[in-house]
Amino acid sequence: MSRLCVVIDIGKTNAKIHVLDDALDTRFSRSRPNRVIDPGIYPHYDIHALWRWLRECLVEIARNFPIEVISITTHGATAALVHPDAGESGLVMPVMDYEFGGVASESDYHAVRPPFSETCSPALPAGLNLGRQLFWQKRYVGRAFNDARHILPYPQYWAWRLTGVAVSEVTSWGCHSDLWAPRARDYSSLVDQLELRAKLPPLVHAGTVIGTVTSDIAEQTGLPSSCLVIAGLHDSNASYLRYLSRANDRSFTVISTGTWTVSFCPATPLDSLDEGRDMLANVDINGNPVGCARFMGGREFDVICQRTGSKPEGAFGVADLQQLVDTGVFALPDFSHGSGPFGGRQPEIRGQAGSGVALASLYCALILDYELDLMGSTGELIIEGAWLRNASLCKLLAQLRPQQRVVCSKDITGTVTGAAQLALGGASAAPVLEPVTATALAGLENYRAQWRAFLQEPSPSRR
């Protein structure tokens, strides 16, 4: 009989819940928008609505499946400050939306922020450096901050809600937080500067079983009281962990796509990372730093479609791409207000796009191609996640990178499968990969050269 696992996957744009078996096949799935609400001291995630939805889904799941274990994966740059006596949610203050720009005005943060050489965390806009959020909260919501017993990375907050056990783990701390020193495999100097250490729960491996669901959760949902919960992990790392068995050869790059496009290239030396280009080190589940580059691909795709009057899910073909190349229509970054290798540059669209979806796809392929050059990526390129729904985008990348073999995972939910694999011990279930056939657009190399040349022009808003 198959073992069954629930995966709770909370992304920046959408929250999902799935049931997978030990063959890593999906047996159940639901999703909903991950809403941010503005009232209060700062914009924050609607934790109460999200919990109600998760509980309703768990009731339905428990009614139909004998669940043995729950695994959790979430977006990064997020933490919850909790106390066991602070009501059902346990929150002593709301869980801040990392796009809150108010935290960026704190110039004093630069005096305590560790150097890039220590943390491999670039200085990012808004609250994308988690340390900046905590600095702001401690300064402006000090009483509640001091009341918190634990500061929990976001995956471990949900694990705590289910079990009452407080832990933390390295993939979330090591995600451009300023709080982790990857070479030292320990907290950075910022943790002691902010006097946080006493509030940080024990570090455990992401796959550690931290307990079973509480009696209240079992009663509310119908889950068995024996249902295990593992510590959980950062979402892009969930995609990457599926390839850890290949890390010894190092000749590959995993491209995790969604709201964020994050490229993991284990061959990239940490000393070559350029913080001004949104390059950084993430930390895998074993604590090993991995050179990465990233941009807000899903968000930028949507913005380009919006600006050109297109729907992101709209159809397009090779002829639409060829027309953009032939007529010289360009989308130039940055459409995300600060992320990516050209973060802070004034975005622009030059020319009239016949298909905004084609233009957004071409833009994302060009940004990723540029980042792969920055990382010195030379081996196989493995595409995971949302881009698998856009075959033409993957084919564009294959044409732009003829020196590399581009393959796509057949599983469109790499973060979910990775989280389930961690819980069910399916390490031998290697992802099925399919080679990508490149487009054959005429003039694409010249188009790329012109696009890159435009980006060398002075930009007063470039960071």
Image: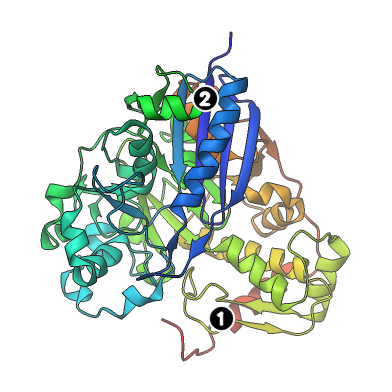
* Few, some or many residues within 10 Å of mark 1 (<14, 14–19, 20+): few
Residue 155 to residue 12: above or below: above
Query: Foreground residue, 127 or 260?
Result: 127
* Residue 327 location, quadrant: bottom right
Point out the frontmost of discs 1 and 2: 2
Residue 340 is situated, as x and y percent measured from the top left of the image, at: 49, 68
Query: Foreground residue, 10 or 235?
Result: 10
Image side of residue 184 versus residue 174, left or right: left
- Numbered badge on residue 5: 2
Q: Quadrant of the C terminus?
A: bottom left
**Farthest-out residue, top:** 1
Where disc 1 sits, the SS reads loop
Residue 382 is situated, as x and y percent measured from the top left of the image, at: 59, 43
Q: How many marks?
A: 2
* Few, some or many residues within 10 Å of mark 2 (<14, 14–19, 20+): many
Residue 256 is situated, as x and y percent measured from the top left of the image, at: 54, 49
Image side of residue 435 versus residue 39, left or right: right
Q: The residue under label 1 is which amino acid type? A: Leu
Image side of residue 76 versus residue 252, left or right: left
Residue at point 35%, 34% (across, down): 231
- Numbered badge on residue 455: 1
Image side of residue 364 versus residue 90, left or right: right
Residue 252 to residue 147: above or below: above
Residue at point 39%, 36% (across, down): 232
Q: The residue under label 2 is which amino acid type? A: Cys
Residue 374 is situated, as x and y percent measured from the top left of the image, at: 47, 63
Can residue 422 be seen at all in this image of the molecule? no
* Residue 190 location, quadrant: bottom left
Coloring basis for residues: rainbow
- Numbered badge on residue 92: none
Residue at point 17%, 55% (across, down): 147
Q: CA distance from mark 1 to mark 2?
A: 46 Å
